[in-house]
Image (tube, rainbow, N blue to C red):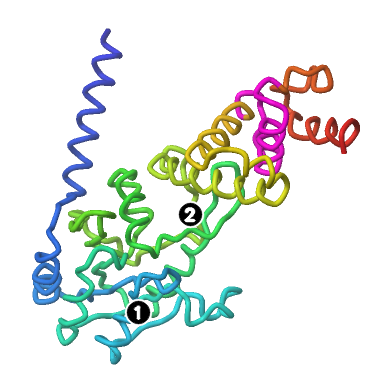
Amino acid sequence: MTRCRNSYIASKVGQLYNRALMERLLLKESQLRPALLEHLEQAGGESLFALVDGTANSGALYELFRYAPDAEYHPLFLGTEHEPCLPHSPYVVMIDSTHQDFMHRCSDTHLGIAWFTSPYSLNRQVDFWQNRLYCRLPEGSTMLCRFWNGHILNRYLAALSAEQHRAFLPLTNNVFTPVRGERLWHHHAQHDALSSPAVASDSWTIDETQLQPFVAEFKRIQLNDIEAALWESIPNVLDRIHPNLRSHQISAGLVSGQQRGVSYHQALSRYVECYLLWGEHFWRHRLFEGIWNKPDTDKAFFQCLLDNIE
């Protein structure tokens, strides 16, 4: 009982500590520009930066070059393996009080711009954000993470504690991120002082719990990819399914495969193909006997298809 009570007290103290270090406020679109200007006026050596997603079809890059053409900026893909994509790239931009038209235009949340204040130079920001282009996933693989998109950054920051936020963004004090689908901004305000000098690791490891806000989108993308593959392999079967039921059937096949221990994307895609071709209980056929929910289920499933069907 004492241990439980001590754990409860410790958790409450931790919550209060997090609140003391981090404040998350809501701003209307009309309140963003005054808030940014206020931070510029009271900067005390801090600069205002914008993260502009030039990889999305949102018009953000157009707004930058039209309303802040003289601003200092750096495309984050420059000098990386993604340089051939230029001018489509994330940009880190230093903004000052002469760029009020840009602030006003980019108060529109659908543009996906993120804003932050920092005492560190543009060159330091470029080095840091290029280190954040890739992150390690829980299983050890690496992937390109679009933290430069304000909508994605907004949901990711919401999943972090104050300490995790500081570790993830060690060069920032105030971050402003747009709420997707709403005309609102989140102001993430740090109340502890930045360490000097701030040190950022070369890569960031994403904890599995921090991926929860994106699970629904991951599933939607996975379903879209599987459907695209099915149109290549069994177009006649898909064509016979009513369009309103198609995604439901594919989703049911995906869930069935995951319940059998199928995990790799290509294996799940083939499982759904079999599910639609032969029915929801195809996995019970003697050809697949003994392969489900094993460490090598994906490999065994492919081998069964190769030996008996293909």
Residue lying at 65% horizontally and 43% vertically, measured from the top left: 265
The secondary element bearing badge 1 is classed as helix
The quadrant of the rendering that contains the N terminus is top left
270 left or right of 151 in image: right
47 left or right of 54 in image: left
Residue lying at 22% horizontally and 62% vertically, measured from the top left: 174
Q: Residues within 10 Å of mark 1 (few under 14, many from 20)?
A: some
Residue 132 percent coordinates (x, y):
46, 62
Q: Which amino acid does the dot numbered 1 rest on?
A: Leu
Viewer-closest of 228 and 255: 228
Residue 122, disc:
1
Q: Which amino acid does the dot numbered 2 rest on?
A: Trp
What residue occupies the far right of the structure in this picture? 307
Magenta span main SS: helix
Is residue 274 one of those drawn in magenta? yes
Residue 303 percent coordinates (x, y):
85, 34
Quarter holding residue 14: top left
* Position of 230 relative to 303 (above/below): below
* Position of 230 relative to 173 (above/below): above
Q: Which region is colored magenta? A: 258-281
Is residue 307 one of those drawn in magenta? no
What residue occupies the far top of the structure in this picture? 1
Callout 2 touching callout 1 (CB < 8 Å): no
Quarter holding residue 75: bottom left
Report the residue marked by disc 2: 204
